[in-house]
Amino acid sequence: MGEAFIVAIDFGTAYSGYAIGGKQDQLSEELMITAVNGKRMRALKVFTESLRYLKDHALNTMNELTCGRTFTASDFTWVLTVPAIWDASAKQFMRKAATEAGIVRDLDRNLYIALEPEAASIWCKQLPSSAFLDENSTSATYTLQQKPGTQYIVADCGGGTIGITVHEVLDGGVLKELHKASGNDMGGEQVNKNFKSCLKEIFSDTLWNDYERRFPSELRRLMYNFSVLKGMDDDVEFRCPLNLGILAQREKPMENYFENVQGVSWDEGSIVLSRAKMRSFSNESLSGITKSLKEIFKQDLSIDYLLLVGGFASSEILRTHITEQFGARCKVLCPASGQQAVLQGAVMFGRNAAVVASRKSAFTYGIAVSRRFDASRHKAEKKFTSERGDCRCRDLFQTLVTIDEDVGWDETRDLILPPPDRDTTKVRIGFFRTERINPLYVDDWGIEKLNSFDVQMPDTTRGLDRKIKLQVKFGFTEITATATDVDSK
């Protein structure tokens, strides 16, 4: 039944501001995060309870609409979207949170992790031409549908992150990743932060911090109203929140706060932001997006389209800027339902995970092995004598896949490993990654240990004449590894 029903959860801006998979705080089970009121809580708890609420809400809604039939989480395949820039540990964190939230059971395979821009790409690929708007907001006459050879970029401009993927349409409509998923943390929330900084400049840090602490609900309404206005390429006017005005007027007349702040004025209860001021809030985000896209256009690719999706893509300022920067190189398009592209594509991904036929490896991945010692190549301090009596070299990096290598979505890299000693009953396999092409040792510069697991080899009867079969899948959205003792299975 799980294959018949798909539920997708797009966490959206829940990610923003912290823990962007290594870009800021590393997502881990021990990570603590701090609320505006100063209270601290484990990030895992926050994410778990958020997912639990979304899961319960989805199930309750479906149960109410199905004439008495009761569904449980195990009846569905769940798809959880994450930013493209999140690394393996962050994805594993989300899987852990989903498990604790009761979405799936431990080791349950009914959960897919989908990359946000990749999900958006899957959705955009099948849209008819009438579903796209060009830079002049008129119906576009372009389509990606089933046209082999078409190359396009999808920039998922969300709240917390900008995620970018590059795909080529292959025969049969499946996709090939041409450039590993990339991006930055310069999404729409950065514009919100700059807006808040402007209000701090107007009212002072002390007054603003007091307001933020005492009236969080009113502040949320203010930020929501700003999110509706922030993409307008024009002067913007909005009512000053009641409690902010009360706090401010206790110190001095409202007009006095605006005397020395450029691009901002007071008009009978309203705050007016000039067009130039509104644009300035987006400068950092626009610069970050432009930098990431320019890196892609440096590659030997033939990009036909650049698609802008996500909530921030509704910004007129953003769309105009991207068209000015890249409109001469390719057609810049925006789906009319761009805000839903990630969620809709995640459902399609859950139904057919093979739609992205191959991906680029983000790193060079490998494991630690030993080989016969070669004095001309190996360090003397790595030399040791094995039980067989031959000289070996330890800590060698055995490459499984190389950075930027094309890997099929269901392809495995296989390796046969012997036990280190005759009486070994447990072998620990450690996994490492690097941006280098051909490292020699696992403890060289630029090498990071990802994780490890133990393989039990209980039967020592055959001594060194035993084998472990290691199979690792790199071409999916998560790396999975299986190691099997050939004798005991």
Image (cartoon, helix red, strand yellow):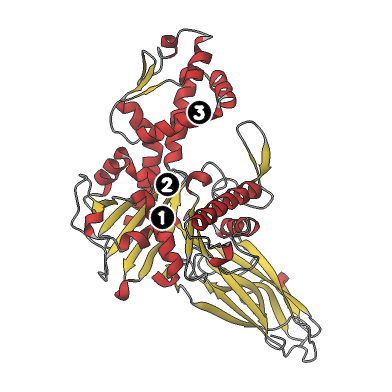
Residue 356 position by quadrant: bottom left
Q: Amino acid at mark 1?
A: Val
- Label 3 secondary element: helix
Q: Do residues under tags 1 and 2 come within 8 Å of each other at their CB atoms?
A: yes
Q: Amino acid at mark 3?
A: Leu
Residue drawn at x 59%, y 81% as measured from the top left: 415
Q: Do residues under tags 3 and 2 come within 8 Å of each other at their CB atoms?
A: no
Q: Classify residue 303 as left or right of residue 443.
A: left
Residue carrying label 3? 219
Mark 1 vs mark 2, foreground winner is 1
Of the pair 63 and 101, the residue shown nearer to us: 63
Tally of numbered tags: 3
Q: Classify residue 426 as left or right of residue 131.
A: right
Distance, label 3 to label 1, CA atoms, is 28 Å
Residue drawn at x 35%, y 64% as measured from the top left: 167
- The disc label shown at residue 158, or none: 2
Tell me, yes or no, if residue 300 can be seen here.
Answer: no
Distance, label 3 to label 2, CA atoms, is 21 Å
Q: Classify residue 327 as left or right of residue 464.
A: left
* Relative to 168, residue 90 above or below: above
Number of residues whose C-alpha sits closer than 10 Å to that of mark 3, classed few (under 14), some (14–19) or many (20 or more): some
Question: What is the x, y in percent for residue 267?
Answer: 35, 14
Question: What is the x, y in percent for residue 252?
Answer: 49, 7
Residue 455 position by quadrant: bottom right
Tell me, yes or no, if residue 259 can be seen here.
Answer: yes
Residue drawn at x 66%, y 48% as measured from the top left: 45
Residue carrying label 1? 342
Distance, label 1 to label 2, CA atoms, is 10 Å
Q: Amino acid at mark 2?
A: Gly
Quadrant where the C terminus is found in the figure: bottom right
Question: What is the x, y in percent for residue 49?
Answer: 62, 49
Number of residues whose C-alpha sits closer than 10 Å to that of mark 2, classed few (under 14), some (14–19) or many (20 or more): many
